[in-house]
Amino acid sequence: MNLLTPPARSADGSFPEGALVAVLTAQPLDRLLDYKAPEGGCVPGSYVEVPLGPRTVIGVVWGPGRGDYDYARTRAVGRVLDLPPMPEEMRDFLERAGAYTLTPMHAMLRLATRAPGLGEDAGTVRLLVPGGPEPARMTDARRKVMDALGEFDGQPVTRAELSAAAGVTSSVIKGLLDAGTLAEVERPRDPPYAPLDPDRPGVELTEAQEHAAIDLRAKVRGGGYGTTLLKGVTGSGKTEVYLEAVAECLRRGRQALVLLPEIALTSEFVARVERRFGAKPAEWHSGVTGTERRRCFRRVAEGQARLVVGARSALFLPYADLGLVVVDEEHDPSYKQEDGVLYNARDMAVLRASHARAQVILASATPSLETWVNAKEGRYDRLVLGSRFGAGELPMMRAVDLRRERLEPSRWIGPTLAEAMRERLDRGEQSLVFLNRRGYAPVQVCRACGHQIGCHQCDARMVEHRFRKLLMCHQCGETRPMPAECPECGVEGKLAPVGPGVERMAEEVAERFPEARVAILSSDLYGSARQLKAEIEEIAKGAADIVIGTQLVAKGHNFPLLTLVGVIDADLGLQGSDLRAAERTFALMRQVAGRAGRMGAGGVALLQSAQPEHPVIKAILAGAEEDFWAAEAAERRAIGVPPYGRMAGIVVSSPEMHEAYGLAEEMARRDEPLRRAGAELWGPAAAPIALVRGRHRVRLLVKADRGVPIQAAVADWLSQFRWPATTRVSVDVDPQSFL
Ligand code: ADP
Ligand code: ZN
């Protein structure tokens, strides 16, 4: 068909063949592109393949075309993909989220189409499965394949995925197929998920739990938008209660999403869903294969996948009818995406739900201050589960004043804590030693010249990882072998570790308690989430007497035999200028303490501190949560920072220091659009970490009253400037940290 003018849009809103449509793609263009609708037409939201230069890319029909280009030369949409169109609610959400985070729409669409092979037809796919015994000849490469297959733990995996995950060539995989160790089967793509049965009996709820469940069920039944803070100490049954809301959502025939802050927690949760609803939910996170992600995307779009458990990016799946979003451990800093699109999944969950007319449940023992204020001011409802389920008691919390403890040099466990640990060991109970620092020692100092070993590319010191025998930069991940001589003065044998990391704590524990079985829980010591999970399960069953852990242990794992938590340095998080230092320390200490005595063994938490009179430490000990939040809120209100004021952090970075400063200073000079809107600009100043991966970083901070539309003002202001491709400007609305 060759028309001279485009046909009009149909009355039902669809676009007949030849009509002009505007298509959004994930390519870095600053506008939508006009195409002609293909044979059979398309509708707003259709996923399409379009020609772009010499390539074919995936896009979404966003609305009618602009028609400001020669119609005869406008190219046609290649084809409409076999997927339900993206709902209007989701398109609106992406636009609002993009406007809120000042993210261009092509980047928002990339976030929303992150499943491989979306353009391919359903059909069948060839998958690898275990086929027989291990081959007689086991090479290193073959072992890697077997390990990778184990990692996938029964998930469907293609040849390409397996060879990429194992880091081997496809010939190794072929060898294993020939040997019969692997077999290849042809399966239909994207099989439906097994149905979940909401009416299987759950646990018998306590009165407080039932009260909360009744409230949440009614909200889900109501069918509109609302956000509820579900607050209760660890172990009070928040998960049991929100699963009741999930059950109600399933009964209504709508979809539910549960966000977890840590992939290591998913398998425990999936098992719980299976016990409760008789089948597994769909999973969406970085540990899931591409084949499985594609299945999830498609089945979510069709409305067939009814419960998704996932990481923050699961918010950007094209739900057909989203009825409930649960954000578990809503205070967790990992909900803030810190690179690429800078967004906070908790806030985006609320935004998405308000578009989808869904309910949000924010679950936490220690809510973020933002959520606490929203609940206080009535924007969110609030349900509180008072005590722990069953005999579980919150541990007794005590400070150990480090100024009065006699610590030997290079020792961090004081006599008080050591004695408490000794008692547990004698009684056959578990202790947890908490230190939020990975590695062996945070600094290496040369005792000859005083030099501290730093990263070549970052303004950071190299951390010693003794297990792995190397130095690592925690900013950029660069590693180096541990040198024998000082890189500065060349003297040999004078480098000494200063300060403790968890590996060094393990050394101290082993020396003090040689008979104890010691386990370290630190994210870098395990090759994979699966190994980590296996280790956690072993520990929970009693495989260790003393557990040494980083913040990883604070996140919702169950350790029933644990009766003592010793915090090595409760002051650690209070240093530095971070706005949220107090809030984070408060949450972290309470979470860590919550690991003790979960099953009613009467736990104790000892916090070693050099400043036990610090208001935050006092609030932690007293458990005076409401007072703590009220005081924190008052302080933030007084200085006009979030949630009482609005902020946006700008980082200008460049390999050339003068370029970064040049642009930042020009930005500061031309701040008229900000001032006009009622916002102030602070800076520029070197960022707290002034060099990362060889890029010099300069910070500016925009601050305004709560009522100021800060995004529009910042967009307006930034539109004045041009910068070379080597310079980057990142904008972080509602920054979590000031690094
Ligand atoms: P939270 O999410 O607040 O940490 P959970 O829901 O995980 O708490 O509950 C802690 C433990 O107590 C879980 O093993 C859970 O199954 C159990 N539990 C909670 N409430 C009940 C109940 N009413 N009956 C039986 N077991 C319960
Ligand atoms: Zn570095």
Image (cartoon, rainbow, N blue to C red):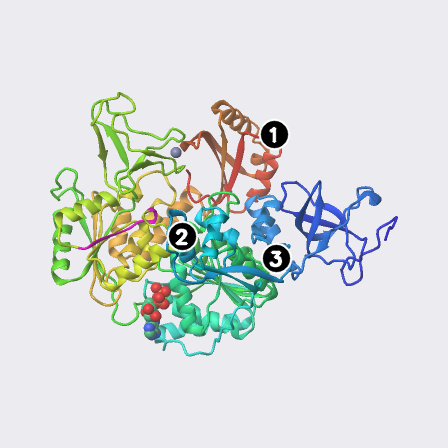
Q: Name the residue carrying label 3.
A: 90
> Could you tell me which residue is drawn at 35 percent across and 76 percent down?
207
Query: Which circle, 3 or 2, is nearer the viewer?
Result: 3
Among the two numbered marks 3 and 2 on one chain, the one whose residue lies closer to the N terminus: 3
Closest to the observer, 623 or 450: 450
Q: For the residue marked with disc 2, what is the amino acid?
A: Leu
Q: Name the residue under label 1.
A: 722
Viewer-closest of 639 and 221: 221
Q: Which of pointers 1 and 3 lies earlier in the amino acid sequence?
A: 3
Q: Which residue in the protein does label 2 denote?
A: 369
Where residue 17 sits: x, y (%)? Answer: 80, 56
The answer to whether one can see residue 330 in this image is no
Tag 3: amino acid: Met
Decide if residue 110 is on the left or right side of residue 133. right
Disc 2 crowd rating (10 Å Cα; few below 14, some 14-19, many 20+) is many
Q: How far apart are marks 3 and 2 (CA)?
A: 28 Å
| Extent of the magenta region | 517-524
Count the marks.
3
